[in-house]
Amino acid sequence: MATPDEKRVGEVLIVTGMSGAGRTTAANALEDLDWYVVDNLPPQMLPHLLELTEFAGEALPKVAVVVDVRGRDLFGELPAVAQSLRHGRPLRVLFLDASDEVLVRRFESVRRPHPLQAEGTILDGIRRERARVAVIRESADVIVDTTDLNIHQLATRIIDLFGEDGDARHTVTVMSFGFKYGLPTDVDLVADMRFLPNPFWIPELKVHTGEEKPVRDYVLSQPGALEFIDAYALALRPVFAGYQRENKRHSVLAVGCTGGKHRSVVTALELADRLAEVPGVAVRVKHRDLGRE
């Protein structure tokens, strides 16, 4: 029996549908799920692209290709090309749709013409496109109606449909730092551990770091240390659940002390362990200022 990784090798997803229905949002969500995404490829180039990706093997196990009416007359070959490819590799077609009224409103909001509008109205372009994509829509494996979805909801829908079991919906970087070197830029949350005694002033601990057991034991034994860490990790659970609902894929949690060597390092590691248990969250740890003293 093939392993899950072996089954993923060679998977192909064709993303198509109505202009304005959310193809860009879907492509971005797929990239976040580690799909290799190619935008606006003529259907006739699909076999050649897939031949190239086969050389990469497991380095490119999942390929998504956005194909739509921007390909002009070449787009008409998509049904035949897709059918021929189904005999060689696992392939699915995702069709994105929305009501005419919503599509018109979306084009008007960005002040761009429909690609098939020509000298007519936006609605004229939409009707021409519907006629061209009717056959593709009928044979699509997955149809997503985005009429009532905002971009965050659509991205979440794509993740639900095409994410592997266990794929993280949010990645948090827990970063220790020293306040004397300045606050990190582009952080979302900051915790200040200077309310705990500083091991720097204890001669036998000064030369050690928060990655070492003597400092860890000392910091965690201080009144309020474990209480803060446990309470803060618990308080962050609804925050990360909200980030996932809003399709915020990345965040940075900065944990500071005076020099970024002792208290912040211990706390960052402890928080990372607790946050790794939050569903849908992947955790990375970075010690920005460790080694500067």
Image (tube, helix red, strand yellow):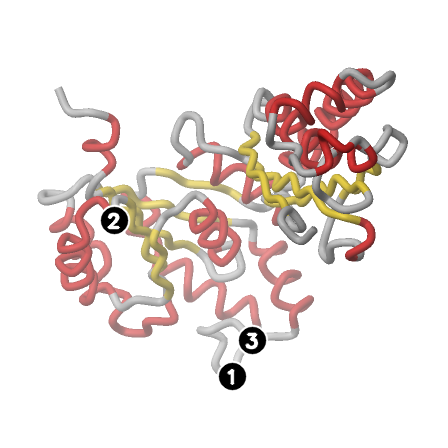
- Give the image location of residue 1, x and y in percent: 12, 19
Q: Does 122 appear above or below 93?
A: below
Is residue 42 or residue 188 the one in the foreground? Answer: 188
Name the element at disc 1.
loop
Pointer 3 local density, CA inside 10 Å: few below 14, some 14–19, many at least 20 = some
Label ID, residue 287: none
Pick out the residue farthest to the front: 203
Residue that mark 1 sits on: 119
Q: Which residue is rendered at x = 45% and y = 54% of the image?
A: 27
Q: Nearer the viewer, residue 12 or 218?
A: 218
Q: Residue at x 21, y 40 (%)?
A: 9
On the question of residue 12 being in view, the answer is: yes
Quick one: label 2 or label 1, which is nearer the N terminus? 2
Query: Of tags 3 and 2, which is closer to the observer?
Result: 2
Closer to us: mark 1 or mark 3?
3
| Mark 1 or mark 3: whose residue is earlier in sequence | 3
Q: Gap between marks 2 and 1, in whole Å?
A: 45 Å
The answer to whether residue 138 is left or right of residue 245 is left
Q: Residue at x 21, y 32 (%)?
A: 7
Q: Amino acid at mark 2?
A: Ala
Q: Position of residue 194 (x, y in %)?
A: 86, 36
Q: Which residue is mark 3?
A: 113
Where on the picture, by quarter, is residue 273? Answer: top right
Q: Is residue 245 left or right of residue 258?
A: left
Mark 3 / mark 2, whichever is N-terminal: 2
- Callout 3: SS: loop
Q: Amino acid at mark 3?
A: Pro
- What residue did someone put label 2 on? 59
Tell me the crowding category of disc 1: few under 14, some 14 to 19, or many 20 or more residues within 10 angstroms, Cα based. Answer: few
Residue, far bottom: 119
